[in-house]
Structures are given as C-alpha cells and as structure tokens.
Amino acid sequence: TYFHQNPINHTIKPYFLFATLTLFNIHLRPKHDKYSHTPPKIIRKNSHPTTPANRIFTTIPALTSFNKREIIRRSYIFTNFADANNQSIDTMKLKTSIFTLWLSAAVFTAANAEAPKGYYNSCENLGGRNLLSELQDVIDNHHNVGYDGLWDVYADSDVRDNGTIWDMYSTKQWVFGKSKCGNYKNVGDCYNREHSMPKSWFSEGSPMKSDAFHVYPTDGKVNGQRSNYPYGECEGGKNLGTHNGVTALGRLGRSTFEGYSGTVFEPIDEYKGDFARTYFYMAARYNDKISSWKSDMLAHNSYPAFSSWAVKLLLKWHRQDPVSEKERDRNDAVYKHQKNRNPFIDHPEMAEYIWGDKSDQRWSSTSSNLPELNAAGEIKVIPTISGVEISVSDDARIPVAIYSVDGTCRFNGQAAGHTSFSLPRGIYIINANGTAHRISVK
C-alpha cells in the first residue's frame, strides 16, 4: 500500500521484500545453514559502524522464537540498510511506515510471550491469603541451578541487545564473563551477584540463595553499599557518584517513607517496579518459610508476609513502574532454567488481589488492573516543545509505548489523565492503547 500511494525509486522494493521475509522469519539461505547456531554475520562498510552512513547489515540466523526485542533489532537493521549501502533516496517516511508495521507485530508477539496454558488454573477464584498460598504450590519445587549456575542463567536473562550484562545498580555495560568480582575499590570495577532480598535475611538458606528471580548481576561497589539494608525511599542520601565514566545508580540514606525511619537503599525509579515484583515473587515462592526470615520489611508471618509500611511501598512501586519488556524477557529466560515463573510479571494484577485494593475479591485470569476506556473516552497525543503529552479522558489508564525510529524503547508503561514525557530531538512512534502515532520533537 505504501508503494502504491508513494511512488519512489524501484530499487527500494527488494528491501521491502527483505523486510517482509525477515519479519515473518523466512530465510533464503543455503540448506546446510538451516540449523546453524553461529553468531550473526556482520558486514561492515568503510569506517565507523555507528555513524548513519556506516551502519551494519546483518544476515540473521534462523530463530526458534521471535520476541519483541528481536523485531525491534531487525527493524533497526532494515531501516538503515539503504543508508549503509549508499542509496541516495529519502527514506524517512519509509522507515517510519515500516517501523510502525513492525511495532504492531512486536506488540502482538509480546502479548503471546506468556506462561504455558493452564499454568495458573488452580489460582482461579482465589484472593488474599488463599491466592498467595496457592501461588506457592504453582511455582515451588523449581530447578535449583546452584550458586555458580547463576552465571549461566545471566547469559540468557540479563543481557542487553548489544550483548552486555544489564546492571540495575550502575550504568556500566559489562562484557559477559569478564570483570567478575573479586576485589573492588570503585564503581565500575567489577560485577557480582546481588541478592535483592539479602541472603542474611534467610541465613543463606537454599534454594533462596541461588534463586535467579531475586539474584541479579550488579556492580560490586554499589552492591556493597546497599549491604543488607531494606529497600525504601530517602531524600538526599549518598550516591557513590561516577568513576571512569561509570555512574552508580541508587542511594543510601534515612527512610522518609511513612512508617519506617531506618536506613534504606533506594534504587532508581526505572527499576523500582522490578524489585517490588521480585519481592512479591519471594513471598509467594517461599510462603512456607518467609515467616522465619528477619528484616524490618517483613511481618514474620506467611500473610501478608510484609510489614504494613513495606506493603504500601511495594504496591506504590508496582503501580508506578509497570511491567517492562526487560522483565518479560527475563521471566521467560529464567523459566527456561528454573522451570518456574514470576506470577506478578505474568499477571501484575495479582498483587492487588493479594495485598492491594482487591484483596477481598477473587482473582480470575480474565481480571485486569487497568480500567477500560469506555465508548465516550478519548485519547490525544499532543507534541510539545520538549516532548509529548498524552491526554486520556474519563479517568482511564491506558498502555503506552514510546520508541525512537532506531528501535530504542523510551517508555513502556501506563498513562492516565494528562501525562507528559520529555524526549530529546528526533522522530518517535507512540503506541497508545493499540494505536500508533508518529511525532517529531524539534
């Protein structure tokens, strides 16, 4: 349709064919390479590969799965293919149109990255204490990968698109297999295994010590600063700063959250929901053990498991930082190794039925924690001087994803009322409640 309405140089048509073949994972290649598991072949042109005129074209090997991250990566590769091969054409509209097509496919694919059919059937029509207890039966007896085995899990679960380790405690992008701690002196020296729920709380017991759902690869120096303090919120606090271009994420200080005044470690906003859902998982997976664990965040019982201030804090973070694609990818990757899942990533609304506003109601797999936009509702996407404003009427909350045209995800969460997003100069594709919009920030 695009080519019919927008006549352009016919040399583009083969690229569109390539995009279609790539999108649907159809590969024209020698038969002997059908089952190849070798890394993608990179063909670089001229000098620096990161400049617009010298990006890369990748021959992508056959895949057994097709997730959103891979679609975005392929869209970036394709939409820059003409530039990389010195095609003298205006491809901006083409890039945006194809990216919009691929973004729609990505949303469809992400929606299908979920738990096996029937995984949560036994939780139907349960709520509160009973739902939490049943979740333990669903996700317990997982395969214990062992403490050393966590490194193997991280190769699947915590790797960015560029192949580096994803660190939630610093800006360092670690090269996998290198810079493991050891000794450290500064931020950026090495990375190790951070027990987001400190192992001293459960006396280093097994299998908690090596459960990948709560043990993350993080900067060693920041991990040491966090120590075994609870997560929380603080004003001011101490951040470890920047060393050799690597910045520490998070701060240590006196709690300012109502109900607790002790020392806490506050992660950055981007990962607060991740850690909240990690804690919800721990309360479910170890519901028969958590009453004996020791921490100011814990209530020393099986339900609600967390102290009242911690419940309020974790629910706040859970609501303000919705499930991200990073978490969904990690959930799938850990499941591959441990054979269990984090229910609060698959079904974020479960937290409300256990600890939140719906704890006196019964959960169903058709439940949703998002109010539906009724027929009279209206969504407006309004470009501003510094970004974009999304306006939603009727007090509804809608799913929103914002991508730059190179495939970088700028936001993936919810919007309600009048929500403003600050964006650097560029072209963006915004998916608001399933409808794609193209904006330019100048």
Image (cartoon, rainbow, N blue to C red):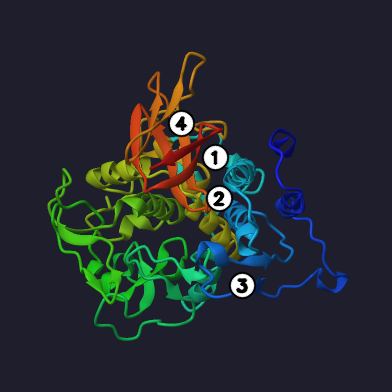
Q: What residue is shown with label 2? A: 138
Q: Earlier in the sequence, mark 3 or mark 2?
A: 3
Q: Mark number for residue 248? A: none
Q: What residue is shown with label 4? A: 398
**Mark closer to the observer (3, 2):** 3
**Mark closer to the observer (4, 1):** 4
Gap in angstroms between the C-alphas marked 4 and 2: 30 Å
Gap in angstroms between the C-alphas marked 4 and 3: 43 Å
Q: Residues within 10 Å of mark 4 (few under 14, many from 20)?
A: many
Gap in angstroms between the C-alphas marked 4 and 1: 26 Å
Gap in angstroms between the C-alphas marked 3 and 2: 51 Å
Q: Amino acid at mark 3?
A: Lys
Foreground of the two, 178 or 53: 53
Q: What residue is shown with label 3? A: 45
Among all residues in the image, which is located at the extreme right?
31
Quadrant into which the N terminus falls: top right
Q: Amino acid at mark 4?
A: Ile
Q: Earlier in the sequence, mark 3 or mark 1?
A: 3
Callout 1 touching callout 2 (CB < 8 Å): yes
Give above or below for 372 relative to 190.
above
Callout 4 touching callout 2 (CB < 8 Å): no
Among all residues in the image, which is located at the extreme bottom?
183
The secondary element bearing badge 2 is classed as: helix
**Mark closer to the observer (4, 2):** 4
Q: Position of residue 332 (x, y in %)?
A: 57, 56
Q: Earlier in the sequence, mark 1 or mark 2?
A: 1
Q: Amino acid at mark 1?
A: Cys
Quadrant into which the C terminus falls: top left
Q: What residue is shown with label 1? A: 123
Q: Earlier in the sequence, mark 4 or mark 2?
A: 2
The secondary element bearing badge 1 is classed as: helix
Gap in angstroms between the C-alphas marked 3 and 1: 55 Å
